[in-house]
Image: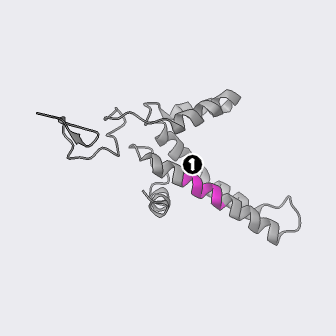
Amino acid sequence: MTLGEAIQSGFRNRAKFSGRPPLSEYWFRTLFAFLASAAAGIVDAAIFSNPEIRLFSSWVLLGSLLPGIAASALRLRHPDRTGWWLLVTLTAIGIILLLICDCIKGTTGPSHFGPNPLASPSAGADQLNGLVLAE
């Protein structure tokens, strides 16, 4: 998935809490939110002389809050965790745990949250990582 596709998917599914999107979609959406926030901060600094006025940054924050929560909850489904694991971020160690969960590879097969988004639909039981096993 490319950056543009991830941004489109993020806006299209901004409050969708079902399925298992690919890992690249999560990280591209996170990158886009970071870049949009940085750009809004630069615009705020250029327009307003008072550093306490953050009009555009506030809009970006409000606009990316629900999609960010949805993306994080869906990302937690890859290692077979529920979205309730986001509550661990209320502790200092929880942020590190969430970052580890965001970086690890998810379950390879289907889970109770849905099929693996990167698994090809034509891959049968006789294939392993794209290699056909000897019959």
Position of residue 76 in the picture relative to residue 46 (left or right)? left
Describe residue 114's horizontal placement relative to residue 93 as left or right.
Answer: left
Residue at 26 percent of width and 43 percent of height: 130
Count of numbered circles in the view:
1
Q: Which residue corresponds to the image point at 29% horizontal and 39% vertical from the top-left?
A: 129
**Which type of secondary structure does the marked residue at label 1 adopt?**
helix
Q: Which residue appears at 64% of the width and 59% of the height?
A: 35
Residue 124, quarter of picture: top left
Residue 50's place in the image compared with 91, above or below, is: below
Q: Provide the major secondary structure of the magenta segment.
A: helix
Foreground: 93 or 68?
A: 93
Q: Residue at x 85, y 58 (%)?
A: 52
Looking at this view, name the residue that lies furthest to the bottom: 47
How was this image coloured? one colour
User: At which x and y percent is residue 26?
Assistant: 50, 48
Disc 1 marks which residue? 68
Amino acid type, callout 1? Gly
Magenta range: 29-36
